[in-house]
Amino acid sequence: MVAPTLGPVKSGERVKTDRRDALKLARNYRAGELTAVWVPDAEHEALRDLVRAREAAKKDQLRAKHRLGKVLLRHGRRPPTGVKPWSLKYLAWVKQEVHFEQPAQEATLLDYLHEVEHAQERIARLDLAIEEVVKLAPPKMKAVIEGLQALRGIAQVAAVTIVAELGEVSRFTDARQLMGYGGIVASEHSSGESTRRGGITKTGNADLRRVVIEAAWAYRHRPTIGETLQKRQQRVSEEVREIAWKAQHRLHQRYRQLTARGKVKGKVVTAIGRELLGFIWAIGVQAETTQKRAERLAA
């Protein structure tokens, strides 16, 4: 399978027939100009639908919170000191202490509050569905999901999202190819002795890029293995734990170096996310190779 939009197109060509298309595909294939694409199997396609449904629920939850928060702000209703926004105490304060004299405003408040609670229930329901799907996932997919959770900043939902968007990690020949797929490499326009680099390309998978950059924020802290991370690493091999520990040292050191040079934190975290994709590739390939070896021995 090839990507039709990535094939070379001749400028000014206005005639398209099946015969011309067949000749063009044959010539481009012989010249190596066609880009192969990976077709997801039924398990990856179903997992991708579930993960994207959860992401849609998170966006709806954010919109619902914004609507309720703006109503309270517009009427000057602020929570007591020490109450964090959208915590249990915050919601209890909205239910018990916030009231309006006008029935229309009271009905508006209740509707927005119910929408926030509905979004929370929806996300919890999808999280439970993701846990059940992971338990029933094929061995190779499950091995990669567990291996990625050895990395700091990547819990179950993030690991499942990465696997759903990437498919088989070993289909990428090296880490640089995976970074390009994520659209997290710098754009470049160079010629001769002139070298010009710009922002990241953003031409790859947007969901993968979002998850990786969110996870990269965890590496601003010094390397350590907390109780939660230690529990996740108990399910993986020693080789995967070594890669994850190396990632903590490398990425934290890189974060300190870039911030010391005065770089903006957003750009620094983007650079950390690009290198994090390299460790994701290493762990994914290691997990898939180990699982394939185990399947051959069992056969």
Image (tube, rainbow, N blue to C red):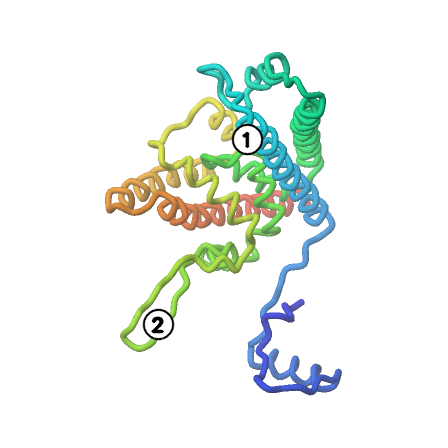
Residue 42 position in % (x across, y down): 74, 50
Three-letter amino acid code of the residue under disc 2: Ser
| Residue nearest the observer in this picture, 83 or 246 | 83
| Residue nearest the observer in this picture, 137 or 257 | 257
Labels 1 and 2 touching (C-beta < 8 A): no
Is residue 70 positioned above or below 20 on the image?
above
Task: Name the mark nearer the viewer: 1 or 2.
Answer: 2
Circle 1 SS class: loop
Q: Quadrant of the N terminus?
A: bottom right
Q: Residue at x 45, y 15 (%)?
A: 82
Residue 224 position in % (x across, y down): 37, 28
Q: Residue at x 60, y 16 (%)?
A: 98
Three-letter amino acid code of the residue under disc 1: Arg
How far apart marks 1 and 2 lie (CA) works out to 46 Å
Whether residue 259 sits left or right of residue 142 in the image: it is left
Circle 2 SS class: loop
Q: Mark 1: few, some, or many residues within 10 Å (few <14, many ≥20)?
A: some
Q: Quadrant of the C terminus?
A: top right
Residue 236 position in % (x across, y down): 52, 34
Residue 289 position in % (x across, y down): 55, 48
- N-terminal of the pair, mark 1 or mark 2, is 2
Residue position for label 2: 190
Q: Residue furthest top?
A: 96
User: What is the quadrant of residue 251 in the picture?
Assistant: top left
Residue position for label 1: 235
